[in-house]
Amino acid sequence: MKKENSSPTMKDVAREAGVALGTVSKVVNGIPVGDSYRIKVEEAIRKLNYQINSYAQGLKANKTHTVALLIPNTQEPFYASLVYHINISLLKRKYRMLLCSTDYDSSQEQEYIAMAQQNKVDGIIGLTYNPNLAIEESTPFIAIDRTMGSHIPCVTSDNFAGGQMAAEKLADLGCKHVAFLRTGSSLTNEPNKRKAGFENGCLSRGLSYEMKIISDGDPYSEFEKFLAEHIHEGRLSFDGIFCVTDALAYSVIKTLQKLNQKVPEDVQIIGFDGTRHFGNKDYTCSTIVQPVPEMAEMCVDLLLRENTSAKPPLVCLPVTYAYGGTTLEGNPEGKPSLPMHDIHKLATHNGKTMERT
């Protein structure tokens, strides 16, 4: 006898509809039955408020329609945008997302992967930092920004072209002596190519340049010291700066303000990512824009492909340049393009700007 407060079962639906249990099973699983039977079952489901256990269904079919996303942080704008667009791409395909955020703790990545596998996810998309990450071959995995072997596809933007584009844009805007600023890990990955692209662009345009590169965990004061050392008679010796992320560009702009340098009148700045205020408003600085919606769609498409041989080891998507007020184009009269008090703070981690490397 059915307990008074227990949830209705498939047997209860069959009894209410006056049909066989197998008929209810077919309707629930989308298998065609006669219209009269289907209508009876659907009415019984509504009347009893029967809830289909899609997870249990998935386990029986060896598919849970759940994908895990492993991400370092959900506060930094680039990561937040990736999370949003990957979730949208999954929802379009009637998949759910299991979000795993490590807050830059690479030691947690393996634990999250084990948890995802225990939950029988259909695959994992990961932007990871752990160089020793172990992925079971039976678990489909798509990497973002880091090549992890020929059996794991990597989706990224064209970082080399982006670095070159930044150098060429600064040259087109009249810069003669520029700086490259980068913070990041020593892990070999695709964003590292921004440096080589920038150098190539400087060489092709005859730009003189200097570089300041620090590692994750080093204090931002290293950049402050570098910039202060290049102030001579009240002017910065650089007339253009390329920062490998928009978040770093924000911090640099604030430092230049303290040094009484005007952006873009004294020094023009280009970042990388395409970060926008409030996620979808104006660009926070002139920037190399990563095609985040297309990257998200590609990650989901590759992950859910049945034909594993059709999955390329590396997909590199094109970047674009966008004006965001920290360069001089569109400002012929030399008026301030980006008042310093209007520069909104971008996400930082423990007071330090992080690069996705």
Image (cartoon, rainbow, N blue to C red):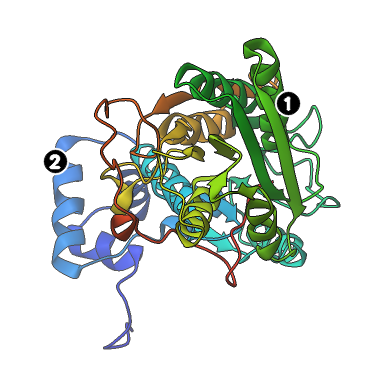
Q: How far apart are the alpha carbons under marks 2 and 1?
A: 67 Å
The x, y position of residue 124, in whole percent, is 62, 47
Is residue 173 visible to us here? yes
| Residue at figure coordinates x 54%, y 26% from the top left | 166
Name above or below for residue 339 compared with residue 243. Answer: below
- Say what amino acid the circle numbered 2 marks: Ser
Q: Which residue is mark 2?
A: 36
| Residue at figure coordinates x 55%, y 60% from the top left | 73
Q: Which residue is mark 1?
A: 196
- Say what amino acid the circle numbered 1 marks: Ala
Nearer the observer, 352 or 201:
201
Q: Quadrant of residue 179?
A: top right
Is residue 63 visible to us here? no
Q: Which mark is residue 66?
A: none
The x, y position of residue 224, in whole percent, is 63, 59
Nearer the observer, 281 or 235:
235
Q: Quadrant of residue 173?
A: top left
Name above or below for residue 265 compared with residue 352. Answer: above
Nearer the observer, 173 or 62:
173
Q: Is residue 260 left or right of residue 32?
A: right
Nearer the observer, 270 or 55:
270
| Residue at figure coordinates x 86%, y 52% from the top left | 132
Instruction: State the SS at label 2.
Output: helix
